[in-house]
Amino acid sequence: NGVPAQFIAQVPTVLSCDEPAKYVAERMATQLCAPLVANRYSLDLVDVTRSPHHRQLFPLRSRTWPAEDRQRLIDLIYRPYRERVRREIGRIAVRSSFVVHLSVRTFELRNHQGKLRRADVGMLYDPSVDDEVDLCLDWLDAMYDEVPMLRVRRNYPRRGTTDSITKAMRGEYSANSYIGIELLLNRAWAARPV
């Protein structure tokens, strides 16, 4: 997988990816006949959805590592993932008039201050992009009809315009050809065996 074994041996407890998000993303990709670009590594190493300059690019666990180890995470995990996403979007953009990019991940039941997050699903989008708004409103209506017990909130637990991989891709593609939606799932229910 491109990451040297001696480096991996230093972090054996954090190498699992976001399994609940991966499960949902795989199911969605199959149902939509869409390609899937999955991050195989935990966001406890490096957050591949953040910009390289973001203060939370390295979570607490890896933030204190030596600079050369953090750079290795960028070179071996962060950049290859971002390039795979960029390549796949570009490949689809050549064949189609627009691309819908769904980024799926989970969030903790409580925020950093310990406050309970009151949502099962968050749909993050840019409210200034009409196509993103329309897609999310239609999707929200469909989810309400199919699974009314789910608490779905728009631009929660954070705004869709904050630093993310979809925001970065919006900067590379025009709103006429790219729609970027982040689907955030509450880990309290998404990780349960069903």
Image: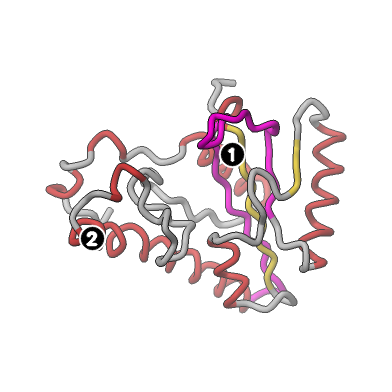
Which is more toward the observer, 136 or 160? 160
Judged from the image, the secondary structure of the residue bearing numbered disc 2 is helix
Give the residues in magenta: 95-124
Which quadrant would residue 9 be assigned to in this image? top left
Residue at horizontal 68 percent and vertical 38 percent from the top: 121
Which residue extends farthest left?
Answer: 6
* Marker disc for residue 24: 1
Residue at horizontal 72 percent and vertical 74 percent from the top: 175
**Which comes sooner in the sequence, label 2 or label 1?**
1
Which is more toward the observer, 1 or 19? 19
Residue 88: image x %, image y %?
Answer: 52, 67
> Label 1 sits on what residue type?
Val
**How many other residues sit within 10 Å of disc 2, few (<14), some (14-19) or many (≥20)?**
some
Q: Is residue 175 visible?
A: yes
Residue at horizontal 64 percent and vertical 32 percent from the top: 117
Q: Is residue 97 visible?
A: no
Residue at horizontal 68 percent and vertical 43 percent from the top: 122
> Label 2 sits on what residue type?
Arg
Question: Which residue carries the number 2 mark?
Answer: 72
The stretch drawn in magenta includes residue 123: yes
Residue 30: image x %, image y %?
Answer: 61, 46
